[in-house]
Image: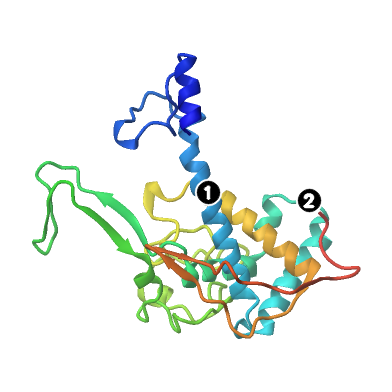
Amino acid sequence: MKNLRASRRSNGSPPTRLETPKSTQKSEHPPGSPTDSFSLLFASIHTTSHTSVNALLDIFTKSAGEICISSLRQEARHNTQFFGGRWDRARLNSIPYHDSALRESMRLSGIAVKILQRKMMAPEGIVLPNGTVLPQGTTVCVSAWGLHHDEQVYTNPSKFLPERFVAGHSSSLEEKKSGIRNPSDRKGLLLRTATEADPLFAFWGLGEQSCPGRYMAADLIKILMEYIVANYDVVPLNERPRNSWIEYNYVPSANAKLQVRRRRGQGVTK
């Protein structure tokens, strides 16, 4: 970085955003410029990869049950027969069990334990209904971990239930207690998609500032899941490798390993 700065100075070039301390940066670049895209690129890499690993570890642990793999494989086989090698929106919307298993993994093993972080900007602060005063500059957030592991919201919150968000399954209490609408009119199969944000599932945030890249991220992970279950046999883990805490991030074990073997004469088209 020092050599880069020296080289740019000698050429009369201004420092890049990566070379400039955040406290002194100015919004001199137009929205969408390559320089301002770095933060989005960095944010998307580890979140998608960690979420993918968490999903695979949850799915391929014996406690998930054989029905989990067989259901995923059945959906993948049906998609291959119906869509062939075409990967499009219709195909990705036709795998409700994949959606449910991924959403359940994000609920149970979500990488971020605090979400909806907001900073009070009003000079007079904000007074909550109970009288609590939040002065200007105060940062508040919501505990995603507490919400997603709350027994008053989800039954068996510490257990991975891949079918939890498939319509007709009763292991989630959110429909009974929250009054949230039930979007089961989607082919009569799906209770919740992997990308749907609601007050009781805050993995993606909530409202206008929900993660804008969640659709692409979920699509990538579902493609990965479908391809693996269709093309490989995986030896189920007796016990899921424990995640690690890095500040408020819950990341999968770097030492986790899965034994896989290519399935002959089966699978999905690349």
* Residue at 50% over, 22% down: 7
Relative to residue 266, is residue 177 depicted above or below?
below
* Circle 2: element type: loop
Mark 2 near mark 1, Cβ–Cβ under 8 Å?
Answer: no
| Tally of numbered tags | 2
In three-dimensional space, the C-alpha distance between marks 2 and 1, rounded to whole angstroms, equals 25 Å
Q: Residues within 10 Å of mark 1 (few under 14, many from 20)?
A: some
Q: Residue at x 42, y 50 (%)?
A: 210
Q: For the residues carrying marks 2 and 1, which lies nearer the camera in this image? A: 1
Q: Which mark is residue 161?
A: none
Q: Residue 124, how many percent across, how many down?
A: 9, 44
Q: Is residue 77 visible?
A: no
Kind of residue indicated by mark 2: Arg
The crowding category of the residue bearing disc 2, from other C-alpha atoms within 10 Å (few below 14, some 14 to 19, many at least 20), is few
The label on residue 86 is 2
Image quadrant in which you'd find residue 71:
bottom right
How far from the left and from the top, in percent, is residue 161?
A: 55, 79
Kindly tell me whether residue 223 is visible in this rendering.
yes
Can you say which quadrant of the picture contains the C terminus? bottom right
Q: In the shown orientation, is residue 169 left or right of residue 133?
A: right
Q: Residue at x 56, y 73 (%)?
A: 167
Nearest the camera: 229 or 113? Answer: 113
Q: Position of residue 95 (x, y in %)?
A: 67, 64
Give the image quarter of residue 228.
bottom right
Quick check: 95 left or right of 25? right
> Which amino acid type is shown beneath numbered disc 1?
Ser
Which one is earlier in the sequence, the residue at label 2 or at label 1? 1
Q: Position of residue 53 (x, y in %)?
A: 60, 65
Report the residue marked by disc 1: 44
For this orientation, the residue located farthest to the top is 12
